[in-house]
Amino acid sequence: MSSTTTPAAALPRVDSLPAAGKGEAVARTLTSVDEATALAHHALAATREHPLVCITTATGHAAPFVDAQQITDDLNGLAEVVIMPTGKIAWAFHDALPPGGDVYGGATRIYPPGSDWTHDTRRAPLCYAYGETDRARAGSQIVRAALAMVRTSTPTAPPARPIVAGGHVLGVAGGRALVDISLGSSGQATIWPELIADIDADHLLTAHMPVWGALDLASRRLDVTGMSLDPQVALADYQPGATVLARVALLDDQEAHLELWPGTHATITRSDILPGQHIDPREALSLHEVLPIRLTSTAPTWRATLHDTDAPIPAAPILEGGPAWLEPPATDPGEQPDQSTDHAPDNHPEPATAPTSDADALRLERDELAHLLAHTNEQLDREQATTTRLRTELRQAREREARLRSTSDKATEALRVLEADQTLFLSPHEQLRFEVQVAWARRTEPGEKADLPLKSWRLGPDFLSTWDAVHGIDRAKVIDVLVDILTGRAATIPARQMHQLRSSIGGNSAPVVRDDGATCWRVALQTKTPSARRCHFWSLRDGSIELSSIRLHDDLRP
């Protein structure tokens, strides 16, 4: 797989560089109602180019539960971070924003660049922290949300003090890749996957992988976006009929859109989920679920189905030399987490002083409701994860049922055809010749037919009557053995136990030979069965075959 990216080895060496800046960014804390109003107007500004992270304190707490300075350092140059105390300042912020767009009570809201979020406040997500125990989790969630907005926005100002640098990935930890910089600079840097795609670092980079990009000296953040493969190169092996991995990106009542690669989607419809059924995609699939799909058409309009999928081909990498960006889903759901534990927050803030006015009492009640809402949202997230797992298991069970039904239907049809084939002629002789010819045609590969033709053959006077007299063996099995006899394959198949019939059970008994010189042979129709059935046939001097009889194991009559 090739691309137009620049290898790290070709980067210029820079011998003297300014030192990386430390502590240059400080989270700003609002101290007045006027500042809160001004911040609200800034959040509503259509010209705002960077995400705005607004962190609030809980009632009775002077500092937020999350590490605001760490968040500020992580987002230095990429987003604005502000701390807002809950109380009059938060109320002023609330009053200047559209309904549903405010934040208070220890929560954090991340406002994307511009003002489009005002039309749908869900685009400005909330992140909740219930106490110090949520410090790391909530902080990581805030940073990831802000960086996702950076990735999808188009700021006009370039990053501060970037230089071209390269090196090798030392490893992945804490959602970041650590890089040993050896070209263009020195020391270590980190790669943030959120700036490239909505995936974990270990699906973007691997240890010892060479990387290059724009290094911000202040944050020591290496932007490797330039290493991204062109979608046409990454998806070159994705052809109609191929089974590939995809991630569910969007669902509605008619269609599902699945990511084949970031920014490239395939569409499946209600009829593409289970054969012969029309199913609401929302009932069968879950957002962000990874599953195999079979492509039915490719660029410019990618379409797919969940029917008749095979083992998927490896997913494409996002970066040159990187790992597959998607992995096949586990076939065994495995042990599931205990969902019965009540995760109610044990750090519910107590007010520093009793409310002194109705307004203070209402604010306190509001903060308590905010904490309750946060806890409810956390429970909802856990229940949503359980719903996703159960929905996947239900779809997989339906798929297995559909496959079994299809197999059963095919077997039923094959049996119907087989039974119909056994009654196509009035003459038993003609019926047998037809069945032998059909079995030979089906069991012999096209390239083998010239080398394995059916020998000239005829029925002996007792063959059909002795067959009728011997019960307990499937007719199709007898036909298959006759084909092996008439093509000569019976002599090479150990299970057929083909040998000359002798006049008695004695080892020195003479072979049975007719007056015309024909020799009698015996072939096993059954093995390891009481009174196992045998087929006797004459091999004539001209090379043709005469089918003589069907006998029990101990019956040595020709």
Image (tube, rainbow, N blue to C red):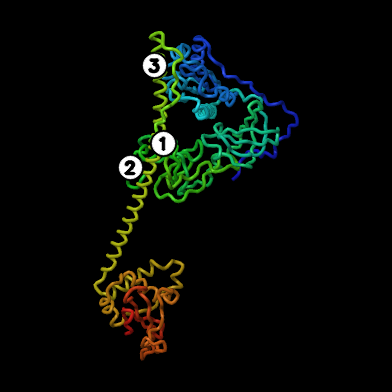
| Disc 3 target residue | 365
Rendered image quadrant of residue 420: bottom left
Q: Amino acid at mark 2?
A: His
| Left or right: 557, with 208 as reference point | left
Identify the disc placed on residue 278.
Answer: 2
Residue 480 sits in quarter: bottom left
Rendering coords of residue 45 (x, y %): 50, 16
- Cβ atoms at labels 1 and 3 below 8 Å apart: no
Question: What residue do we see at 43% from left, 42% from top?
Answer: 303
Q: Earlier in the sequence, mark 3 or mark 2?
A: 2
Q: Is residue 432 visible?
A: yes
Relative to 180, is 512 above or below? Answer: below
Going by the numbered disc 1, the residue's amino acid type is Ala
Label 1 sits on residue? 385
Residue at horizontal 45 percent and vertical 37 percent from the top: 288
Q: Secondary structure at mark 3?
A: helix
Q: Badge 3: few (under 14), some or many (20 or more) residues near its Cα, within 10 Å?
A: few
Tell me whether the residue at label 2 lies in contact with that at label 1, contact meaning CB atoms closer than 8 angstroms: no
For residue 295, say whether it is visible: no
**Mark in front: 3 vs 2:** 3
Above or below for 355 versus 254: above
Q: Earlier in the sequence, mark 2 or mark 1?
A: 2
**Image position of 427 (left or right of 449):** left
**Spatial separation of the CA atoms under disc 2 and disc 1:** 25 Å
Residue closest to the eye, 379 or 515:
379
Q: Nearer the viewer, residue 188 or 321?
A: 188
Q: The N terminus lies in which quarter of the figure?
A: top right
